[in-house]
Structures are given as C-alpha cells and as structure tokens.
Image (cartoon, grey):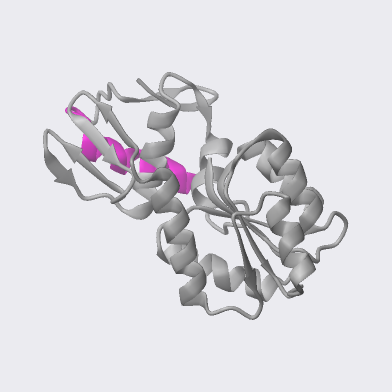
Amino acid sequence: MTDILIVEDNRELANLLCDFLRMENYTVSVAATGEKALFLYETYGAKLVVLDIMLPGLDGFSICKKIRETGNTPILIVSAKITKDDKLKGLFLGADDYIEKPYDIDILLAKIKGIFKRRYSLDTIKDGSLTLNKESRTAEKDGVKIDLTGKEYELLLLLMENRGKALKKEFLFHQVWGSDSFSELQTLTVHIKWLREKIEDNPKKPEKILTVWGVGYKYL
C-alpha cells in the first residue's frame, strides 16, 4: 500500500510535494486526473490522499465522495477553491481537513505527519526476534536496532504486512518507489539482497524473504 496518493494536475507542484514527502521517507504516487486517482486508489490503496479539487475529468469532490463510499482513508483537500461553501462541501463529503492554496509546505507536512501519527502510530509488527515500529519507522532484531534506509524499511513493512503472500515484483516496485519513479526494476532485487543481509541469519539461505520464481517475493 502506498503511503500517500497525491491528486494534483499541476505537475510542477506535484513534483515539488513528492520531493518533500520522499525526503520524509513516505512512499508516494501521483495522479493528474480524477480517473487515474481512482484507478491507483482502487488498485493499490493509500494511507492518505492529498486531493486537489479542480481536476480534468472527475473533480476532487467526486473523488472524495467515491472514496468515502468504501473506506475511511484520511483525505486532505488542498485547493484554490477557498469559499466557505467549498470548504463545507469538502468536509461534509468526508475530508479530514481542507487547506487553501497557496500553502506553506511546512504546515502541510506537519498536518500530514499529524494524520499519520494519529491514525497509524500505535501499530507495530512483530515476528519472532524481528520488530517493526511504524511510529519511528525503525526495525529491531533481538532488541538491537537494524540500520535500514527508507526504501528498505518500506519494502520490509510491505512484505511483513502481506506475510505468506507471493507479491509480484512489479507490485512491490510500484508501492515502494512510486508510479512515477525513474528507477529500474533491478533496484528492487538489490534492495531485497540488502534486506536479507540485515535480517536473515544466513542471507545465502534466506528463511524470511523468499523468492517465488516467476512471480516475486514473499515473507514467511
């Protein structure tokens, strides 16, 4: 699952926000139209949707309504439509907050961090000697902190959250590196190797992160 889905048709603004969020180690996907936003959300999910209102095709209000029909994913509306009626409409449709454009990036990041802390910070994932802490975005093995990069952490979290499931390489790559990444699929293979070296007792004979030939990887 992607951390944040940005729905924004201003490419320059979307790329800028992506850069800031990825520096904070969030996984990010971007959609420039309402139709693509719903496709990405319904296909891959998201922990938070940052949603513009004025979009080609389906507008942000329609997307907000559609998401609320099936789930309670946090929605943060960021829009130049700043009348009281617009704000009330967004909030009545189920948005968690409504921010005016132009916005201060530090304030937006603080609101995003606040949403993640309130919604997801209490979660930890534990498997034997291995523990992931979602609040601090850290990992420990036998009580000793493992030095993971942001991408390694996201990849391990995704695998552990889908324990026992064979996940396709393309799915893992999209979720961790984002739909607009310029990285190559081989990057995933390299990160799997690095993860095994850090969490497996014998990286050459892995027992946790297994290769599923012709498909991808799974965590046992």
Note whether 87 is above or below 188 in the view shown. Answer: below
Residue at image coords 81%, 49%: 35
> Which residue is at a point 43% across and 60% down the rendered structure image?
113
- Whether residue 95 is visible here, answered yes or no, is yes
* Residue drawn at the location 24% of the way across and 42% of the way down: 139
**Residue lying furthest right in this view?**
57
Range covered by the magenta-colored residues: 184-202
Viewer-closest of 73 and 16: 73
- Please identify the quadrant where the C terminus is shown: top left
Residue toward you, 5 or 71: 71
Residue 188 on image: x %, y %? 45, 43
Query: What's the residue at 48%, 64% (across, down)?
Result: 111
Q: Main secondary structure of the magenta part?
A: helix
Image quadrant where residue 150 sits: bottom left
Q: Which is more toward the observer, 201 or 23?
A: 23
| Left or right of residue 117: residue 199 | left
Q: Is residue 32 visible?
A: no
Residue 117's spot in the image, x, y percent? Answer: 39, 52
Q: Is residue 22 left or right of residue 210?
A: right
Q: Position of residue 142 (x, y in %)?
A: 12, 33
Tell me if 139 is positioned left or right of 168 in this view: left
Q: Is residue 123 magenta?
A: no
Residue 67 position in % (x across, y down)? 70, 42
Relative to 169, is 15 above or below?
A: below
Which residue is at the front of the view, 82 or 161?
A: 82
Give the image quarter of residue 201.
Answer: top left
Quick check: is 194 in the magenta stretch? yes
